[in-house]
Image: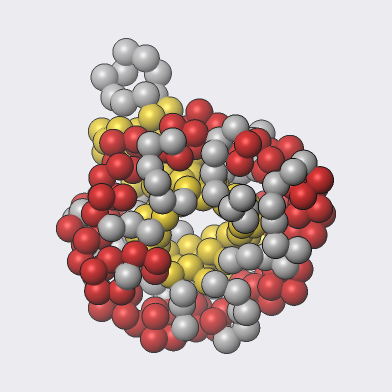
Amino acid sequence: MNIVRIIPCLDVKDGRVVKGINFENLRDARDPVEAAEAYCRQGADELVFLDIFATVENRKTRFEWVKRVCEVVTVPFAVGGGIANLEDMQTLFDVGVSKVSMNTAAVRNPELIKASSNKFGKEKLVIAIDGRKNPHGSGLPRLEVVIKSGNESTGLDIVDWAKRVEKLGAGEILLTSKDADGTKEGYDLEMTKAVAEAVRIPVIASGGAGKLKDFYEGVAIGKASAVLAASVFHFGEISIRELKEYLKAKGLTVRM
């Protein structure tokens, strides 16, 4: 049985970890270096660092922020936000990042997925997909890809896009529901399951975890290979150890 990975997410703005609801109303959580050190000690399997305003502000990832975190992490570390070309990726790998994550740039230029996979290896490439649900009759896909921190519609069907990024060479998918983000009402299981069952590469469930059972359902119902969360970890509502013990008791395989 595959090991379920537990992944805290560091959404970073102005050098601080922040968290909001539906990608808005951000509030300060903690220092990213302090958070990274704490999560590594607590048993996180991986960390994700997202410079969440890089694309919106039309700039590159703030490499100085990433470098500070790289100096303390002891687990695989993925970075996303503002990555637009192979040179950006090389810079991140040179400072010690394990994986890079693309979202908007991949939608704008899908061939970049193939080029980066060929150059660095698919195991180093995460494609982040942000999605939302549209009402029937809207003329848009029921499950639609959105970009630029969820502010821009693409008209792309999530499942179709997931299949395409897999074919182009993505190593895994980080799937975030904008509707569920920060609500603590559970992952969007419909969206997660639809994507996970459509591809062979791992899918990381993101957006909405608030209770222990939400993580279990993300794997058992949503078919995710890994579960990512922010709020519940940042504000001490659930510990990584507590979560792993719960998932193990529910019959899932975790790394203790």
Q: At 44% across and 32% down in the image, what residue appears?
A: 194
The answer to whether residue 112 is left or right of residue 148 is left
Q: Quadrant of residue 187?
A: top right
Q: At 62% across and 56% down in the image, what residue appears?
A: 3
Q: Residue 80 location, x and y as percent?
A: 42, 64
Observer able to see residue 198: yes
Q: Is residue 198 above or below residue 59?
A: above
Q: Quadrant of residue 117?
A: bottom left
Q: Is residue 62 above or below residue 5?
A: below
Q: Residue 182 location, x and y as percent?
A: 61, 43
Q: Is residue 91 above or below residue 225?
A: below
The answer to whether residue 25 is left or right of residue 116 is right
Q: At 45% across and 59% down in the image, what residue appears?
A: 52
Front-lying residue, 223 or 46 = 223
Number of marks drawn: 0
The answer to whether residue 55 is left or right of residue 9 is left
